[in-house]
Amino acid sequence: MGLSIDPSVAIMALIVAILVVPMGCQRPKVVNVGAVFTFDSVIGRAAKVALEAAVSDVNADRSVLKERELRLFMEGSSCNVFHGSFGAFKVLDKEVVAMIGPLSSSIAHTLSDIAKGLQFPLVSFAATDPTLSALQFPFFLRTTPDDAHQMSALVDFITFHGWKEVISVYSDDELGRNGVSALDDELYKKRSRISHKVPLSVHFEEGSVTDALKKSKSLGPRVYVLHFGPDPLLRIFRIAQKLQMMTREYVWLATDWLSVTLDSSLIDKGTLKGLEGVVGLRQHIPQSLKVHQLTHKLKSNGSMNAYALHAYDTVWMIAYGIEKMLNEGINITFSYSEKLIHAEGTKLHLERVKIFNSGKVLLEKLLQVNFTGIAGQVRFGSGRNVIGCDYEIINVGKTGVNTVGFWSRNGGFSVEPPDSRHTHKKTGFVSDEKLGNITWPGGGREKPRGWVIADSASPLKIVVPNRVSFVEFVTEENNSSHQIKGLCIDIFKEALKFVPYSVPYIFESFGDGHSSPNYKHIIQMVTDGVYDAAVGDFAIVPTRSKLVDFSQPYASTGLVVVIPTNDDNPTWIFLRPFTIGLWCVVLASFLIIAVVIWILEHRINEDFRGPPRKQLITMILFSFSTLFKRNQEDTISNLARLVMIVWLFLLMVLTASYTANLTSILTVLQLPSAITGIDSLRESEVPIGYQAGTFTLEYLTYSLGMARSRLVPLDSTEEYERALKLGPTAFGGVAAIVDELPYIELFLAERTGFKIVGEPFMHRGWGFAFKRDSPLAIDMSRAILKLSETRKLQEIRMKWLCKKTCAEKSDGNPEPNQLHLKSFKGLYLVCTAISVSASLVFVFRMVRQFVRYRRMERTSSMPLASWSSSPTMRLRELVFGFVEFVDEKEEAIKRMFRRSNDSDNPFHVVEVQADPEVRQN
């Protein structure tokens, strides 16, 4: 009985047989691997030798591929995408299972697409572009760390030295652009940034490089990060030296291209001298016998670098992967691609290109490889990049290239190699990390500042508000000097003395001189780069902090509410109706009236005679008792009565005015204010004053929701006083003023009758504004803190805000409801005139009587007193005689004159009439 086979089944079996047993299904004795890279390059020359040595060592070790031979086919790419692609197809024609290379990141992008299409692993030992990702290029592997890894090390070095801004200089290709992008990302994590980028042509035209570096000199940062391919001529440093950019204020940091160049080339001492102070990275290779042997072999060929060691490990890594695949019984087979077969007839002969059928399997086995190579551990991470290596920090000094420390991702910086110290987790504190002594450009050991804020050629442009009110804080003098001065200016100058470097600057005032400028516009000009900084009474508020960087506050402040005041301390309120000057005049008036009345009444009134003590008490009590109209002594002289009439009238006016004013003050004290703080002010509908140009308007309207129609802008302390006195009902008046505390303190120091109600709110401070990310903002903050530890800050405040004592200010500015001396000027003039006239009449009468008395003594029979021959003694005796005569009672002198007249004319008695004002009843 024969077997019957369905024809369709037979056809299907034939198709499966063709697919399962493709061309080249036998297990080959030779495994081909390709390599495409630039032979004639710094890395390529060493890599070629390392690859050949690795293939030789793999074939010599029968434990890896057993009896099979690993054969390497190499093609040059000439640093060109076209040549690289052409070389790749030539290698693929050899039925390679994997391809090594290329060196160039630009070529790697193209070859990765080819590897993806033909499904063979592409393993690079030098293409460090971080954008060569596994998601986009699944068949691309990298046995060297990408640029993101070394940028992390470089940023840690920048952070270690406290620099915040850098200038990146890079080649304008995939390597440079994407490497600098990784640098920017790492700097952002550390709150630093690239302030300026300097792309250079890959052809390195010296003129354009010179112009680009010269332009960067005008910028503030002095930390340069160099990232491009190895340059045996080191042209960038030669140009920088011509531009005098290798001095003490500059910092030059290079990625590992510099160490590759120095390790692979014979650099003379003259060239090294031009590189003095440059700091770079070098991949740390753990020392071993194998490393020593291979290094010796590479150096004998005139070139050696870390990438050559990675190339050596790449061959071994591919060999281990092939071994794993073959051990699992997977054959090395190739097949034609239908799409490429249709390209038959083209000059590229793409129909000859075959697809490696086990490419995905080999890729999987390569990713599983884990061994210790001569360059370190070879193990792939999640991004299909080898786990990052450690770096050496190299420094070019006078004697050569020195290693000043080591960096590892987990351990940070150390002076010990990572493989010789205990691995510990990086703490993030710079104090836990150490580096050796570094020679910086110019030969100095002191760390450069890393930036220059300004120089004499281009000083810092600082804008200051030209205030017309509260000029004690900051203003520009309206004279020929146009000097800018004030409390803020003095604090800035004093704080600048604590900044550890010189900062040339110029002040430029902003404002028309008729009204205070708008501070929002000033801050915006700093943000726009019109000015580098702003110095003045700038409140630190959130909206401004988004635009500029502020220094540490040099003055604490907050908003307060001020209203017309009622005296809350009435202990001495009885003195308030009169000014101090008027009180002094009133007291002096009582004393003067006492003296005048005593003079006029002493000779004729017994109440004003007696011992000196009794007379002094009588005259003082008489004078002050007139205040209550309770005099025990009566005036006899008509002159004294005339003086008393005027004095009592003046005293009546003073008493009535004092009583009325005191009553008014006490009445006002009993009237409570409806405004107790910002809350009550917010709930009311009364008009509110604010200082024009400040942030107060924005806060009251946007934060507190007050209607703009309620808010009245005021420009000066005079307008403050006028508006508060007018009150909320009058046009232009306000019920209260909301302003910052320093302004109000100055206002209250100069004017009385106003007070602060409620607690200060929206606590803020005044600071100096700088452009975003300006290092001077941080240094100025430290300087302000140091200044606050001295007495200088308080002295500046006393100088500008308390130029006079409080008593002097009170005298010069009496309260508005006090009575002044000028209010009673007319009455005092009349009283003074009457008193002086009465005194002069009394003195004239006394002189006339004294002359008559002296004449009577000469003609009388009474013996005359002995007169001295000296004129001085005679004048003295005359004065004493006049005083004694005035002290005599008027009645005694009158009797003496009567007796003298009787003795001169015995037959005719002439009656001496007493003056009417001294006649007694």
Image (cartoon, grey):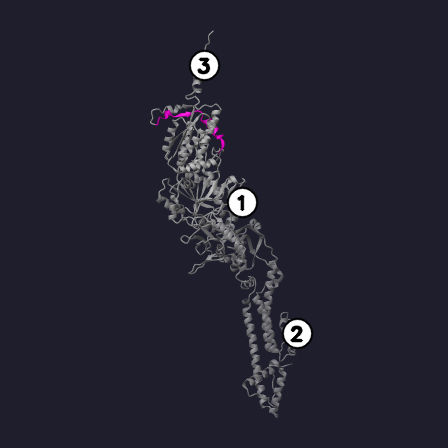
Which label's residue is closer to the chain start, 3 or 1?
3
Q: Secondary structure at mark 1?
A: helix
Q: Which residues are magenta?
A: 348-372
- Write the residue at 36% across / 35% down: 78
Q: Residues within 10 Å of mark 2 (few under 14, many from 20)?
A: few
The residue carrying mark 3 is 9
* Local SS, label 2: loop
Q: Position of residue 868 (x, y in %)?
A: 57, 87
Query: Does residue 172 lie above or below 921 as drawn?
Result: above
Q: Residues within 10 Å of mark 1 (few under 14, many from 20)?
A: few
- 334 or 28, nearer to the observer: 28
Query: What amino acid type is highlighted by mark number 2?
Result: Gln
The earlier-in-sequence mark between 3 and 2 is 3
Q: Within the magenta stretch, is there residue 816?
A: no
Q: Is 86 situated above or below 731?
A: above
Task: Write down the residue under mark 1.
Answer: 432
Q: CA distance from mark 3 to mark 1?
A: 75 Å
Q: Amino acid at mark 1?
A: Asp
Q: Is residue 690 visible?
A: no
